[in-house]
Image: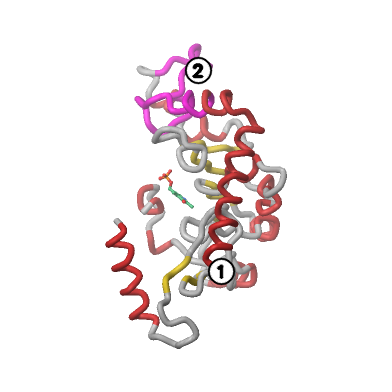
Amino acid sequence: MSINVVGIGYNNLIKVGTDKDGKMDINKLNEAMEKCKAAGKIPLAVVGTAGTTVRGCFDPMREIAAVCKKNDCWFHIDGAWGGSILFSPKYRHHLDGGDLADSFSWDLHKMMGAPLMCSAFITKNVALLKTICGHSQTAHYLLHQDREDIDLGHRSLQCGRRNDALKGWLCWKEKGDEGFARVVENFIEHADYLESLVREHPRLEMMSSRVFANVNMRYNPTPGKTSADLDLNELNINLRNNLL
Ligand SMILES: *Cc1c(COP(=O)(O)O)cnc(C)c1O
């Protein structure tokens, strides 16, 4: 949807395949780049995900950054869910190379528990947002040059909007880097514990490998037997609906 909203269009979105752990496959990324260029198209940007929504996977950012550098492409990291891992000295290695991105998005309203909504767009290029959102040229009747230090309108696509950044700042101030690290580690350690329960249980099974706080599992009443996956899916959907 986002690709339509920004005007690039869904047909120009290229999905890159993943390996068995759900991480972006660098060979497939390289192939997609070559295919795109051979068709006379210009690859604009690569989006790596730090903490995919369902599996909680982290793409190999250092390798993606090298591909982007070689192809003169923007490198964005979608860290909406997993960006918070950077606070934890124990687990941040999963996001190795994250510092090589041109931009990074991070939702404090997810793992950090800030009230909806509280999303940060982070970029090293300080002038970028002002250049793109240059309302000061077109909306000179609204935004005055001499007030740009306090006027968020200069750096946002929207004009009137809530000061969501204040919630993020307060939440960070209250817990501090160490408090944020504890939140992340607590979630991951609860997930480790849940995974151990699933693995010990005779009729529960893990559906994918995991590193973050996502635990994908299902109920299988006939372990060892090869029941049709479709039946199991239906059974698990019914189970979930009954639980709800
Ligand atoms: C939740 C999520 C989003 C969307 O985030 P919102 O800011 O809540 O709309 C984007 N990417 C990933 C990986 C997510 O998990």
Report the residue marked by disc 1.
200
Q: Is residue 77 above or below residue 133?
A: below
Report the residue at 56% width, 51% height from top. 190
Is any atom of residue 168 visible in this view?
yes
Q: Nearer the viewer, residue 225 or 73?
A: 225
Task: Residue at 59%, 64% (x, y): give it.
Answer: 23
Left/right of residue 138 with respect to residue 38 in the rendered view: left
Q: Position of residue 188 (x, y in %)?
A: 59, 50
Q: Residue 94 falls in which quadrant of the image?
A: bottom right
Looking at the image, which residue is at 39% across and 26% down?
A: 138
Instruction: Give x and y (percent) for residue 156.
Output: 44, 31
Q: Which residue is mark 2?
A: 148
- What segment carries the magenta color? 143-169
Q: Is residue 193 above or below residue 202?
A: above
Task: Please name which of the two marks, 2 or 1, marks the residue nearer to the observer.
Answer: 1
Count of all numbered marks drawn on residues in the image: 2
The answer to whether 97 appears left or right of 203 in the picture is right
Residue 85 image-quadrant placement: top right
Q: Does the magenta segment cover residue 166?
A: yes
User: Does dot 1 land on a helix, a strand or a loop?
Assistant: helix
**Res 103 visible:** no
> 57 and 66: which one is in front?
57
Q: Is residue 176 left or right of residue 147?
A: right
